[in-house]
Image (spheres, helix red, strand yellow):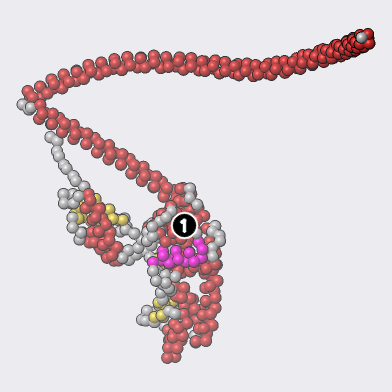
Amino acid sequence: MMMIVYISAGVLIGACAGLLAQYLWSQRRVTSARQRAKQIIEEAHREAQGIVREGKLEAKDELHRLRTEFEASTKELRQELQKEEQWLAQKKETLDKRLDLIEQKEQGLLQEREKLVREKQALENERGRIAKLIEEEEQALQRVAGLSREEATQRLLTKLEREVEYEAATLVRRKQQEALEDADRIARDVITQAIQRCASEHVAETTVCAVSLPSDDMKGRIIGREGRNIRALEQETGVEILIDDTPNAVVISGFDPVRRETARRTLERLIADGRIHPARIEEILGKVRREMEREIEETGMQAALELGISGLHPELIKLVGRLKFRTSYGQNLLHHSMEVARIMASLCGELREDITKGKRIGLLHDIGKAVDHEVEGAHAAIGADIARRYNEPKDIINAIAAHHNETVPENRLAVLASAADAISAARPGARSESYDLYVRRIEQLEKAALDVSGVQSAFAIQAGRELRVLVDADAVDDNQTICIARQIAKRVSDDVQFPGQIRVTVVREKRVVEYAR
């Protein structure tokens, strides 16, 4: 029993000791845990304080950054606001100015309106006064003439219409006359100055195709035995030698002026030498031909040099030289061409055209006449083809082709060429023409016009260069006048042979004669 008590006491004491040991161990663990917790808390506190400090620093940095950004954005916004304020201020100033201007215009319009109202009132008053005067005038006219209002109005309008038409026609005629007088004066001044500045000497030279003989016995020597000398001379030169009853002279006939001149010089040398036979004829003729070629070339070069023209093709120079032996109505063509070149230079100088081209056209305008006996066609067209063949400019070619109005002029130089050619050819003494031929041509001109229906009379004036035609004003109207002019011009071109051109002027005039007593 006791044993059990002791064992129970031992167990109880052991349990108490175990509990005490466990309690002490637990106290130590609690104490250790408390210390550990305290350390953790202290470390956590220290870490929290560090985090707080870092957070404060970061917050300060972020606050500084945000403040900087805010200030920058605020500054930009402030600048924009300032600009907006300035723009608004300018806009306001502009609107104020426009408002002032609108007010001024409105005030001006009000004044103008008041002025128009006053003028309208004055106009209405004047209309009333005029209407009253017209009514009084109509009443007076009705009392005097015994006419109704409509009849008086019609007569008055008719009278006013006639007066206005007369005044208008008078004004138009006066203006037309003034324009014609100015144009005629300017044209005369230009042509007069050109002729005065040209001042070139001109001798109308006619090529003589007769050779003087020392005696009539020389005719037999020229004919030779059985005509062998004259046949050889004619065959070599291409001309016809006429030996007739003319004392001490033989006549050389040939269409080519160069051949004719060559034959004349050859015959003169044979006569001077005295030895006339086929071999001697051939020898002398060869020398004369070479001399003629040199003379032609030198003459062309001298003409171009005298006029200051350069760059001509050698063949053109030879053709210019050939003009020395060519005449037209007794006028030497080389002298005529040089004179036309000088006139062209003066006209081009007055009208500010190319003087060099003008002189070139004048010298070459009749170049076709140097070969017109060899080539068919008008000399103007032949000359244009020659100039085109030797690469002359287009305006020069057109001027040569159009100087007789056979081609439409395409430039002012072509018109001036026609005028210069007419000036040189039509001046007194420039050309010779038989009296009978001249009278016959004048009669043909007038007859060609008189045969047309509606023509009263016709007069050839200006040495046959103009045909003045008077028509019956009662039988022919203005449109028919144009047709008559064209019809007469065509008849003259078809029926009459003439150099250059003829101007046809048709006059339709209505004359009314009254006598004031």
**Count of marks, rendered view:** 1
Magenta span: predominant SS is helix
- In the image, 236 versus 491, the foreground residue is 491
- Residue 35 visible in rendering: no
Q: Is residue 304 above or below residue 157?
A: below
Where's residue 290, x and y in %? 54, 75
Range of residues picked out in magenta: 378-392
Residue farthest along the bottom direction in this orientation: 226
- The answer to whether residue 11 is above or below residue 306 is above
The residue positioned 21% from the left and 20% from the top of the image is 127
Along the line of sight, the residue nearer the viewer: 205 or 374: 374
Location of residue 38 in the rendering, given as x and y in whole percent from the top left corner = 85, 11
* Extreme-left residue of the structure: 146
Q: Is residue 161 left or right of residue 268?
A: left
Residue located 42% across and 47% down the image:
190
Query: 326 and 60: which one is in front?
Result: 60
- Can residue 500 be found in the magenta stretch? no
Rendered location of residue 335, percent (x, y)? 46, 62
Q: Residue beneath label 1, please?
A: 395
